[in-house]
Amino acid sequence: PRTQGRPPPPVFVQLQVMAWRLHRTPGTSQTLDRSQRFVCGRVLSSRKTGTSTSRTVRSTRRVPEAKSSAAPTKGLSSEQIAATPEWKALVEHVSEIEDTHLRDLLVDEDRCASMILQMPTREFLDTNQGNFKPTILLDYSRQRVTTKTMELLFALAEKVGLRSKIEAMFSGENINMTEDRAVLHVALRAPRDAQVIVDGKNVVPEVHEVLDKIKDFTEKVRSGEWKGATGKPLKDVVAIGIGGSYLGPEFIDVALSTGTHRMPKKSPELDYLPPMRAAQGRRLRFLANVDPVDVARALRDLDPETTLVVVISKTFTTAETMLNARTVRKWITTTLGEEAIPKHMVAVSTNLKLVSEFGIDPRNAFAFWDWVGGRYSVSSAVGILPLALQYGFDNMQRFLEGANAVDEHFRTAPFQSNLPVLLGLLSIWNSTFLGYGARAILPYCQALAKFPAHIQQVAMESNGKGMDITGKPIPFPTGEIDFGEPGTNGQHSFYQLIHQGRVTPCEFIGLVKSQQSVFLSDEIVSNHDELMCNFFAQADALAYGKTAAELRAEGVPDFLVPHKSFSGNRPSLSLMLPALDPYTVGQLLALYEHRYCIRNDALWLGLHGVVTVWGDLFAESLFKALCGD
């Protein structure tokens, strides 16, 4: 707008109005009423759709509650699922969608409004003004779906007994069939008075016993009560782990490191510090790769006298982790001697025998359980211990509360307003029925730079299987290749392909309020508003495209028209958070964790039926043979 001499578009005002003024009081998830029908900053009725020759689909129906007379079917193989009437109806429906274009679907205001949903979140002291009611907003109106598509997807979910499978997970049933274990990362953030029964025993008291131990230990370290071998306070932490023991904690560390929002005090007598202030004077490093270069980077500029090392390995036998632990142990003992280890190294493990043999005091080992999968372990001591050392236990308690809020939403909300269920069903529609083999996760927030890498593991380890729970080959495509990069960096990297090359469904994640607000007096808009303009524009560009007629009307020479034409009709969804703080980071994490239970594990494989990472274990067996040789 500035280069063309036009005033800025009203998107800035609409963003504020949409997310700060017009949200209804948060309660259960809800659609927006007619006065609130915005699709990520664009008033629906004011959008000019341009030229289109495709068939217009107009529906006055909102997405209804799915009702199925068929009883939920348990234990279906993938072949049996593909033979159900519900599955076949979706296959036949694909041809209807292929005859439509998003330009036409987005004209239907009722359809669009029914695809904008809210989920409540917590208020912030520094955004508590006017009638702002903070919610997380999901807009999936730019997906290649109609209300009929959603009805068919809900019917399929009912057919495979999705609700009962979700409840089985929360109830502690051994739904990891290949290892005969429960899958209970939700228990890690359950309230103290909750009950989660595993093998006849409530595991919540054990969870909070570990959390209490983490709180006590981290407060001693942060206050200086716990000192190193030479009497100096421990200001730096190196967390050694790999896979889920690294990717999840690093994502949260990066997300919180610039966090400045102040939330209401849970305990008014305590002085709550935002994450960035809580971490002042402290450093947290992660060591994952067995490559010695990673060791050098993790230990660069650190002093053994002021460094605490957290070794994270459930069995204390993970090859890469233990080699790195021995390397760092040598770094400490070379300077401080063997007697320094109990003061400078702690463990997250269940193998107390090996912990003790390593030289770590077993009293300084923090437990987690075999019903916690590695990629879901960030809510356990795996993530909470190193992160509480950096940001304080109070911040990590808020993180767990945010994740628990989404856990309860996932467990109880109707499918039609259940955000993880909707995200999972849309992924199934895009990859299995429409045949899109990749998905781009695009956070328009630099603090979420490590989020795509963590979700890549959560998704591709969960859903990267070729067999269903019955041991039979799956006869249709499952899973996607997940990748991503923060905006606007990705726009200068791979967006060319997603606009004019291979169709790749995109998921845009944005914030109403930046962690670090900057506004220069001689600029038209703030830095964050310019970022968010890109957030809105990219989704619209993918959906609408640009036709040859529009280009010629702008005077583009004929020989350039084919090169500047954009087909559009490329699906995306937008997720808007009010701000990024420990509570909303927990919500975002749980939202994506649960959507992958829906994506493949719940519907096609049996809920978490194949948790073990068989591909990785196969490669490990070859690695051990090579090491032996």
Image: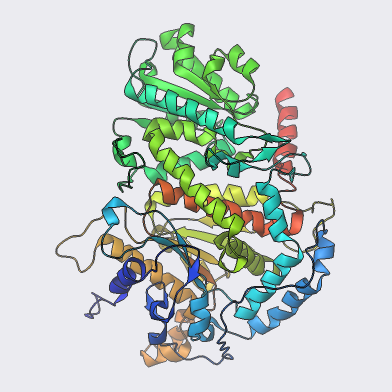
In the image, residue 377 sits, relative to residue 575, either above or below, namely above
Instruction: Name the residue at 30% across, 61% down.
Output: 528
The answer to whether 622 appears left or right of 546 in the picture is right
At which x and y percent is residue 580?
A: 38, 52
The answer to whether 184 appears left or right of 560 in the picture is right
Instruction: Name the residue at 38% across, 44% down.
Output: 256
Instruction: Out of 386 and 508, give the one closest to the viewer.
Output: 386
Instruction: Name the residue at 48% across, 19% down.
Output: 345
Instruction: Out of 424 and 539, give the one closest to the viewer.
Output: 424
At which x and y percent is residue 298?
A: 44, 30
At which x and y percent is residue 215?
A: 44, 28
Instruction: Out of 500 and 137, give the one closest to the viewer.
Output: 137
Colouring chosen for the image of the structure = rainbow
Q: Can see residue 531?
A: yes
Quadrant housing residue 49: bottom left
Quadrant housing residue 323: top right
In the image, residue 400 sits, relative to residue 420, either above or below, namely above
At which x and y percent is residue 476?
A: 76, 64
Q: Residue furthest left?
A: 521
Q: Can see residue 328?
A: no
Instruction: Name the residue at 42% across, 48% down.
Output: 583
Q: How many dots with numbers?
A: 0
Q: Residue furthest front?
A: 193
